[in-house]
Amino acid sequence: MFGITAKLTKCIMLGTRLKCIDNSGAKEIQVIAVLKYKGKHRSLCKAGIGDIVVCAVKKGDEKTRHTVVHAVVVRQKKEYRRPDGSRIAFTDNAAVLINPKTHEPTGSEIRTAIAKEVVERFSVIGKIASVVV
């Protein structure tokens, strides 16, 4: 896993509900843990764009509902700064489900926009995305 060039403001906390934007069957997921989080003692875990989170599926198909999955955050509502000085903010928080061992996406296509910082870290997700902003 590589670093990200942007200066991220991490805003997705435990309990946050994210929209699942791939065609894996899940519609809405809830964050229950953040992998590889390094923070202060007794502080809540936070995630930003490009971070891997462990989630529980709240809405979706009968097979995928009430299961624990891994996901990558691909959009966040809070604005963040890119190295060229521009600031990017999306309209919602969204994630893509991945395989925990290989970090490859579970679904086969992403129809909405994702951030280019995710493609820097996970190039396989960029291959199935239709729009990279």
Image (cartoon, rainbow, N blue to C red):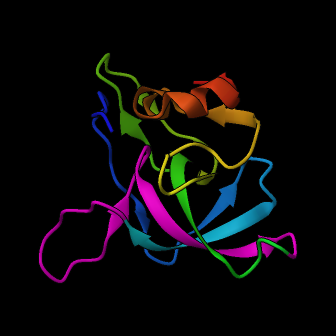
Question: Residue visible at 51% across and 39% down?
Answer: 89
Q: Quadrant of the N terminus?
A: top left
* Residue 75 can be seen, yes or no: no
- Residue 115, image x, y percentages: 53, 32
Q: Quadrant of the C terminus?
A: top right
Q: Is residue 105 left or right of residue 109?
A: left
Q: Is residue 54 left or right of residue 56?
A: left
Question: Residue visible at 40% across and 59% down?
Answer: 11
- Residue 114, image x, y percentages: 60, 34
Above or below, 78 against 33 in this view is above
Question: Residue visible at 43% across and 42% down?
Answer: 79
The region drawn magenta spans: 35-62
Q: Nearer the viewer, residue 84 or 45?
A: 45
Outermost residue, front direction?
101
Above or below, 118 against 71 in this view is above
Question: Residue visible at 59% across and 54% down?
Answer: 93
* Residue 113 can be seen, yes or no: yes
Q: Is residue 51 magenta?
A: yes
- Residue 95, image x, y percentages: 60, 52
